[in-house]
């Protein structure tokens, strides 16, 4: 038996390359001290042959299928136009590997198919898996080089006779999970309530989440966690999976009756969406995965480090942002905006973003999408004057756009209704239709309009919105979801090429497109359309499992939230937004002087701690009170922690707050940032250490014992800073 290790730093995959044409992962967990025992360990983990099965031993390889006796869901499903090729029998063409990468190429010459599967593991213990299927009825040889995707698959008829066209239904990326994984957690959610974690036992059968609505979605983002019983933030074994794709997808966990446990992820394809002529190739999105021995915090450690190491990850300090939406909505009065610019500069804001309402006749959301021409009624002479004023006050200028959509009430649609996806009787959503960006003429028109806006206002930043789901066919009735995602990404890349340094935010009715696929073309997520800090606490916690704080837009809104009608205190709103990419979405010109002063102080404090917040290790605490959340960001010398009481707890005195992740031997000065003593009502009890004015504890004591806090009313927060003073 020939076996090899793919080794990260803390974890490794043991791969058996000899049993079948496609390799089999025998083990995925803690990295061995050396690789000498690879073959022996693989042999020890070769499964028993079960009864009532085929006479050959069943193996769960990297693309399992029926010929191997596998009882679960096949990795590849598709067929040629003549009905053949749906059960390929692979022979290996070649294999390349080192300690960080395995690439295998197999083919079925009789069927006319080739398959490549690549598995990598990086220095942050993030595993990447991708695959490619090629129609080999062109007679060309298959080599071990990973092929490139054929552009525009699904955009039109394939070349060649119908019988020679391969119709792909799905190509699932497959990874086994060790037997110790007994629970599953997935995200659910909706608009204004994204990324809510839910969990269940992992029993025999399938648990599947997915969407066919054109984006990674509020309801079913492409992420799944499998773990040992009772895994939590700090404890337990966890295997995490995320498909880097901003469109339709499926993610499933399956346990077969003969005992195999696996997770699969794939782009979800509509019927006929991928039709491959001879020589053409479909490449999957990449599945990102990691194994953690320290609960969900270990998952974050790996994913955050992986994302921060990308060449395209933002390196400059994340500018504190003011977004005009909840400040003025569609009311783009020049004097009002000028006053907001002055107030923003006085607060220490670093980026001013003009939201929806600047173009066409855009007085509400029923008109003008697709007409990316400045509304001279609101902005006489264009956007240049406002942009110049923003820059004169030392701030960057940003602009809201929604390039993928069009209103029926727009010059663009009236001129040519055929520019949209769908048939003529297609219903509107949010008063919108989806532009067919796979059409070169439509794509070019949108690009050219946006280039004019970029040349005039010279924005440093685009808030790129996406408010309508996309499930319609093109005008000929063909599925168009795959090519629409490709065209959107290409448009983003083209604008960034034409304006180097341009940053783009992925907004999709808030958190409807939060995934590592769209992140490769953007610089930040708008995490949710709600600024209500009580809702935001859970939403931002969900996002933090995969994405570091500097990628999560988090804004301080008005005391009254227009999305929930809840009224909250300024300290809670500050404490919530402080832990993301900080912004303000509030008519601060009407705020009380005291609130403006506190907001300016919070912005200044954020800037002083920004290197910690946007570069440190995120830790979430398994706190004993289910009515409270505790989380922080830690570096060797400094840390910030938040205790948030969401609702009333079962007991009057809050449980002590532990602060894990510090150097055990170090000693840290603990200071309270919020609330100020003056914020505490007279009946709020204060722990003894408050009166002392200073507390110094070891990292070990802070992690194991913690500190007592004052008694909270619900919807309140305490923020602590910890600074290493010795040790």
Image (cartoon, rainbow, N blue to C red):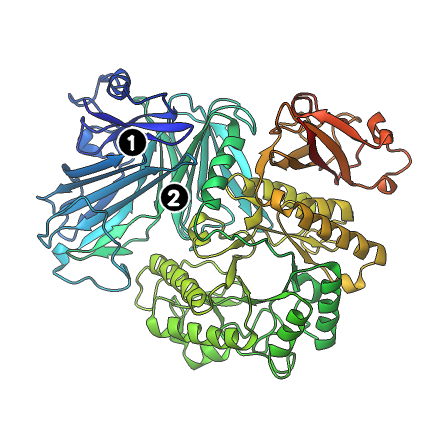
Q: x, y (%) of residue 409?
A: 52, 76
Q: Nearer the viewer, residue 315 or 703?
A: 315
Left or right: 94, with 64 as reference point: left
Secondary structure found at label 2: strand
Q: Residue at x 41, y 79 (%)?
A: 416
Q: x, y (%) of residue 581?
A: 61, 51
Task: Please determine whether, in this image, residue 206 is positioned above or below residue 481.
Answer: above
The residue that label 1 is drawn on is: 72
Which corner quadrant of the image does residue 418 belong to? bottom left
Q: How many residues crowd around disc 2 within 10 Å: few (fewer than 14), some, or many (20 or more)?
A: many
Task: Please determine whether, in this image, residue 454 is positioned above or below residue 272.
Answer: below
Observer able to see residue 152? yes
Task: Please determine whether, in this image, residue 697 is positioned above or below residue 574.
Answer: above
The quadrant the C terminus occupies is top right
Mark 2 and 1 residues: CB-CB less than 8 Å, in contact? Answer: no
Q: Nearer the viewer, residue 114 or 201?
A: 114
Number of numbered discs on residues: 2
């Amino acid at each position: 038996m020939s076996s090899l290790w793919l080794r990260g730093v803390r974890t490794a995959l043991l791969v058996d390359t000899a049993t079948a044409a496609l390799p089999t992962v025998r083990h995925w967990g803690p990295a061995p001290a050396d690789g000498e025992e690879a073959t022996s360990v693989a042999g020890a983990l070769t499964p028993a042959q079960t009864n009532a099965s085929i006479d050959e031993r069943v193996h769960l390889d990297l693309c399992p299928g029926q010929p191997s006796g596998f009882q679960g869901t096949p990795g590849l499903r598709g067929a040629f136009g003549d009905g053949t090729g749906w059960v390929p029998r692979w022979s290996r063409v070649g294999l390349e590997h080192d300690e960080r990468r395995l690439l295998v190429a197999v083919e079925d010459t009789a069927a006319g198919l080739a398959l490549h599967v690549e598995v990598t593991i990086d220095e942050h213990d993030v595993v990447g898996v991708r695959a490619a299927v090629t129609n080999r009825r062109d007679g060309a040889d298959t080599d071990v080089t990973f092929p490139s995707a054929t552009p525009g698959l699904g955009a039109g008829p394939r070349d060649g006779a119908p019988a020679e066209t391969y119709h792909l239904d799905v190509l699932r990326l497959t990874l086994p999970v060790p037997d110790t994984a007994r629970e599953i957690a997935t995200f659910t959610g909706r608009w204004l309530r994204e990324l809510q974690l839910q969990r269940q036992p992992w029993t025999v059968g399938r648990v599947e989440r997915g969407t066919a609505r054109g984006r990674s979605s509020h309801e079913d983002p492409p992420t799944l966690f499998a773990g040992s019983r009772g895994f939590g933030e700090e404890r337990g074994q966890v295997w995490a999976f995320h498909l880097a794709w901003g469109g339709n997808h499926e993610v499933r966990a399956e346990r077969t009756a003969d005992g195999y446990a696996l997770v699969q992820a794939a782009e979800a394809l509509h019927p006929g969406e991928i039709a491959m002529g001879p020589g053409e190739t479909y490449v999957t999105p990449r599945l990102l995965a990691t194994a953690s021995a320290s609960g969900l915090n270990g998952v974050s450690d790996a994913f955050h480090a992986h994302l921060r190491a990308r060449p395209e990850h933002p390196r400059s300090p994340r500018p504190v942002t003011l977004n005009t939406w909840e400040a003025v909505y569609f009311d783009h009065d020049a004097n009002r905006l000028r006053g907001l610019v002055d107030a923003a500069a006085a607060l220490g804001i670093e980026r001013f973003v003009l939201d929806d309402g600047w173009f066409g006749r855009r007085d509400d959301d029923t008109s003008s999408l697709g007409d990316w021409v400045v509304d001279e009624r609101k902005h006489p002479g264009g956007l240049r004057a406002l942009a110049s004023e923003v820059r004169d006050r030392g701030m960057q200028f940003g602009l809201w756009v929604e390039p993928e959509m069009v209103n029926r009430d727009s010059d663009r649609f009236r001129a040519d209704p055929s520019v949209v996806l769908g048939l003529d009787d297609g219903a509107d959503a949010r008063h919108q239709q989806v532009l067919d960006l796979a059409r070169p003429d439509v794509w070019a028109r949108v690009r050219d309009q946006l280039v004019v806006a970029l040349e005039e206002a010279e924005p440093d930043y685009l808030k790129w919105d996406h408010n309508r789901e996309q499930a319609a066919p093109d005008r000929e009735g063909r599925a168009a979801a795959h090519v629409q995602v490709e065209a959107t990404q290409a448009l983003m890349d083209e604008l960034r090429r034409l304006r180097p340094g341009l940053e783009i935010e992925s907004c999709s009715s808030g958190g409807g497109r939060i995934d590592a696929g769209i992140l490769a073309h953007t610089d930040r997520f708008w995490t949710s359309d709600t600024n209500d800090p009580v809702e935001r606490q859970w939403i931002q916690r969900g996002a933090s499992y995969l994405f570091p704080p500097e990628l999560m837009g988090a804004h301080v809104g008005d005391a009254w939230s227009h999305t929930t009608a809840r009224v909250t205190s300024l300290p809670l709103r500050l404490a919530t937004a402080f832990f993301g990419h900080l912004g303000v979405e509030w008519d601060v010109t009407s705020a009380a002087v005291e609130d403006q002063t506190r907001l300016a102080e919070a912005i200044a404090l954020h800037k002083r701690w920004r290197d910690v917040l946007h570069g440190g290790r995120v830790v979430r605490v398994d706190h004993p009170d289910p009515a409270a959340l505790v989380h922080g960001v830690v570096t060797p010398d400094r840390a910030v922690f938040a205790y948030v009481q969401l609702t009333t707890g079962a007991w009057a005195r809050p449980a002590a707050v532990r602060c894990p992740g510090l150097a055990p031997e170090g000693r840290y000065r603990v200071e309270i940032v919020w609330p100020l003593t003056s914020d505490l009502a007279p009946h709020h009890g204060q722990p003894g250490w408050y009166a002392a004015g200073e507390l110094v504890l070891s990292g070990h004591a802070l992690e194991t014992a913690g500190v007592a806090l004052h008694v909270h009313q619900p919807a309140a927060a305490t923020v602590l800073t910890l600074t290493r003073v010795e040790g």
